[in-house]
C-alpha cells in the first residue's frame, strides 16, 4: 500500500495540498517541456499524411487545436485544481464513491494497456531495422504481422514488462534525461527530411509539392482518403481529452501557486504535438520521395514504420530515439495499468499485476493495426475517460447553485453513485456505438459526451439526492 | 562539477542539431549528419546524468500521449 501511495500520485494523495508544498510556474513549464514528446508522436505524425491531410491544414489545424487544448487546461482544469487541491481520484471518490472509482480506474488501466501495446509495436519496429525484420500491417484489425516481427514484439514486450515490474523510477529517470535530446532529434528529423526532399527555400515550402506528391502516392496505393482541417483541429485539441476535459491533470495543477501555471502545457503541446508531429509526418514524406518501395508493406499499401522512418533520416540515432521513446512511454503506462489492476484486486502483488498489464500490452502490440489506428484509439480514449471531468465540473460549479450537495458520495457514505455511473456510462455507450458502428471520427465524440455526462449527472442528482434524503428522513 | 557537464550536454545537443542545419543549407552530406548525431547522442547520455538528477515530477506516473 505504501508503495502504491508513493507511486500512484505522489504525496498528499488523500488531503488537499498545503500552502507549504505549492510550486511556482517555472516548475510546471519545466515539467511539461519534457512531456508530450513521446513514442506516440512517431506514430501519429505519419498517420496524418497517410490519412490524406493537406500540409496547410496540418500547419494551421494543429496550431488552432493546440491553442484550444492549452486554453482548456488553463481555464477548465487549473481553477478547479487550485480551489480543491486534490487528485482526480480522490475528488472522484468523494463525488462518485470508492467502488465506482475503482471501476473507472480499471477501464483506464485497460486503455493504458492498448496504448502501451502500440508503443511496444513502435519499439519493435525500430529494433527490427538492423536485423532486416520488416513491419507488415495486415488487412484485418486482429491480424498478425509476419512471424519474425511478431516474435520481436513478444521479446520487446517481455523486456518492457519485466523492467516495469521492477519499478518505474529508473525508467522515469532515463525518460527525464532523454527528453531534451528526444526533442532535438525530432527537430533534426524534420530538418533532414525537408532537405532530403529539397524543400530548402521558402518557394518550395510554400508550394508544398514535397507533400502533395507524397499524398498522391499514398492515395494511389491506399485508396482515396481525406482528413480535413476540422478533424485535425479537433484531434489536436482532444487527443489529450482525458488529461484536460477528463481532469486527470488536476493531480498536477493541485500544486500550482498561481493560475499562470495553467499556461505551462503550451510548451509540451507546441514541442510534442506540433513540431514533433510535423517532423514525424515529414519523415514519411521523405521516405516516399527517396525510396518509395520501402514505404510499402507486403500488401502494397503505405505503412508508417517509425523505426525505418527514423533510420532513413538520422541513421542509428533515429533508431535509438524510437526505441527510447517507445520504451519510456510504454513502461510507465504498463506500470500505471498494473496499479489500476491492483486497485481492483488489492490482495494481488503489484509485480504480478504489472506483468498481467505487460502481457495484455504485448498481445495488443502483436496486432500492428492497433497502432496503425492510433488516431482513432486516442479519440476513443478521450471519449471514454473525458466525461468524468464533466462530473467534477458540475459538482464544483453547479451543485450548490441548484440547491444540491457537493461530493455527495462522501456525505451519504455511498460507494457507488448511481447518478455518476449512469451519467458516465450512458453517453460513453452512445459515443462508442457512433464510433464503432456508425464510423464517427472518434475525437468528435469527446465534447458531446462530456456535455451530456454533465447534464445527465445534474438532472439525476436532483432525483437521487432527493430520494436518498427522503429515505433517510423516513427512517 | 555541474557547469562543465552542462556545457558538454549543450554541445552534445548542438552536435545533433547544427549538422542538420548545415545539411539543410547544403554545406555537408547526410553521412556527416548521421555520424555527428550519433556522437552527440552518446556524449549527451554520458554527460547529462552527471547533472540532471532533478526530483521526479510529483505525478511522474502520468501517461503521455
Image (cartoon, coloured by chain):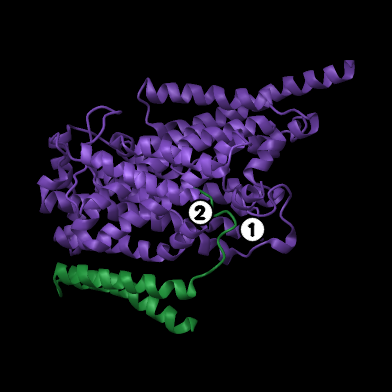
Q: Is residue B25 visible?
A: no
Give x and y (percent) for residue A11. Answer: 67, 55
Q: Position of residue A69 (x, y in %)?
A: 48, 47
Chain appearing in green on the rendered image: B
What color was chain A assigned in the picture? purple
* Residue B64 coordinates in the image, percent (x, y): 46, 49
Q: Chain of mark 1?
A: A
Which mark is nearer the camera, 1 or 2? Answer: 2
Q: Secondary structure at mark 1?
A: loop
In the image, which disc is placed on residue A256? 1
**Residue for point 55% across, 33% down:** A106
- Say the numbered circle drawn on residue A214: none
Q: Across the whole image, how many numbered discs are drawn on residues?
A: 2
Residue at (26%, 52%) from the top-left corner? Answer: A127
Residue at 12% across / 51% down in the picture? A289
- How many other residues sit within 10 Å of disc 1, few (<14), some (14-19) or many (≥20)? many
Residue B14 figure quarter = bottom left
Circle 2 SS class: loop
Q: Horizontal and vertical percent for residue A410?
A: 76, 34
Q: Is residue B35 above or below residue A320?
A: below
Same chain for the residues under marks 1 and 2 in the image: yes
Q: Is residue A458 visible?
A: yes
Subunit that carries the residue with mark 2: A
Task: Using the numbered discs, state the Cα–Cα distance from disc 1 to disc 2 in whole angstroms.
Answer: 25 Å
Q: Nearer the viewer, residue A208 or B7?
A: B7
* Residue A301, above or below B5: above
Q: Quadrant of the C terminus of chain A?
A: top right
Q: First in sequence: mark 1 or mark 2?
A: 2
Q: Which residue is mark 2?
A: A168
Amino acid at each position: 500500500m505504501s508503495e502504491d501511495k508513493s507511486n500512484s500520485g505522489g504525496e498528499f494523495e488523500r488531503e488537499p495540498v498545503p500552502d507549504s508544498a505549492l510550486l511556482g510556474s517555472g516548475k510546471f513549464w519545466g515539467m511539461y517541456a519534457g512531456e508530450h514528446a513521446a513514442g506516440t508522436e512517431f506514430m501519429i505524425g505519419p498517420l496524418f499524411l497517410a490519412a490524406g491531410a493537406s500540409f496547410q491544414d496540418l500547419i494551421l489545424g494543429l496550431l488552432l487545436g493546440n491553442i484550444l487544448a492549452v486554453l482548456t487546461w488553463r481555464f477548465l482544469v487549473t481553477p478547479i485544481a487550485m480551489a480543491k487541491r486534490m487528485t482526480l481520484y480522490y475528488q472522484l471518490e468523494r463525488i462518485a464513491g470508492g467502488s465506482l472509482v475503482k471501476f473507472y480506474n480499471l477501464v483506464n488501466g485497460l486503455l493504458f494497456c492498448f496504448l502501451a501495446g502500440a508503443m511496444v509495436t513502435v519499439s519493435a519496429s525500430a529494433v527490427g531495422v538492423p536485423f532486416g525484420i520488416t513491419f507488415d500491417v495486415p488487412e484485418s484489425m486482429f491480424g498478425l504481422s509476419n512471424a519474425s516481427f511478431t516474435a520481436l514484439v513478444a521479446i520487446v514486450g517481455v523486456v518492457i514488462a519485466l523492467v516495469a515490474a521492477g519499478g518505474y523510477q529508473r525508467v522515469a529517470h532515463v525518460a527525464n534525461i532523454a527528453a531534451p535530446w528526444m526533442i532535438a532529434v525530432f527537430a533534426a528529423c524534420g530538418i533532414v527530411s525537408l532537405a532530403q526532399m529539397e524543400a530548402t527555400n521558402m518557394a518550395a515550402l510554400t508550394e508544398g509539392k514535397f507533400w502533395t506528391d507524397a499524398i498522391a502516392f499514398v492515395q494511389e496505393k491506399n485508396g482515396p482518403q481525406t482528413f480535413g482541417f476540422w478533424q485535425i483541429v479537433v484531434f489536436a485539441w482532444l487527443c489529450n481529452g482525458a488529461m484536460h476535459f477528463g481532469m486527470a491533470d488536476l493531480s498536477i495543477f493541485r500544486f500550482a501557486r498561481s493560475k499562470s501555471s495553467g499556461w505551462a502545457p503550451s510548451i509540451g503541446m507546441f514541442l510534442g504535438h506540433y513540431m514533433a508531429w510535423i517532423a514525424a509526418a515529414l519523415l514519411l514524406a521523405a521516405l516516399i520521395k527517396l525510396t518509395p518501395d520501402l514505404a510499402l508493406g507486403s500488401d502494397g499499401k503505405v505503412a508508417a514504420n517509425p523505426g525505418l522512418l527514423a533510420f532513413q533520416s538520422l541513421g542509428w540515432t533515429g533508431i535509438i530515439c524510437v526505441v527510447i521513446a517507445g520504451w519510456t512511454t510504454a513502461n510507465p503506462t504498463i506500470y500505471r495499468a498494473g496499479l489500476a489492476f491492483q486497485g481492483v484486486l488489492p490482495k494481488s502483488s503489484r509485480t504480478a499485476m504489472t506483468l498481467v498489464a505487460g502481457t495484455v500490452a504485448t498481445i495488443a502490440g502483436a496486432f500492428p493495426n492497433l497502432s496503425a489506428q492510433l488516431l482513432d484509439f486516442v479519440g476513443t480514449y478521450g471519449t471514454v475517460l473525458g466525461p468524468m471531468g464533466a462530473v467534477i465540473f458540475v459538482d464544483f460549479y453547479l451543485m450548490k447553485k441548484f440547491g444540491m450537495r457537493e461530493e455527495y458520495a462522501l456525505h451519504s457514505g455511498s460507494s457507488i453513485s448511481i447518478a455518476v455511473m449512469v451519467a458516465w456510462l450512458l453517453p460513453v455507450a452512445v459515443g462508442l456505438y457512433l464510433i464503432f458502428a456508425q464510423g464517427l471520427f472518434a475525437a468528435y465524440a469527446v465534447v458531446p459526451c462530456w456535455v451530456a455526462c454533465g447534464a445527465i449527472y445534474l438532472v439525476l442528482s436532483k432525483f437521487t439526492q432527493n430520494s436518498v434524503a427522503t429515505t433517510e428522513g423516513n427512517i | 562539477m555541474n557547469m562543465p557537464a552542462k556545457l558538454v550536454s549543450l554541445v552534445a545537443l548542438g552536435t545533433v542539431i547544427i549538422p542538420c542545419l548545415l545539411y539543410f543549407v547544403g554545406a555537408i552530406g547526410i553521412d556527416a549528419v548521421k555520424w555527428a548525431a550519433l556522437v552527440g547522442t552518446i556524449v549527451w547520455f554520458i554527460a547529462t546524468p552527471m547533472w540532471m538528477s532533478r526530483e521526479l515530477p510529483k505525478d511522474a506516473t502520468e501517461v503521455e500521449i
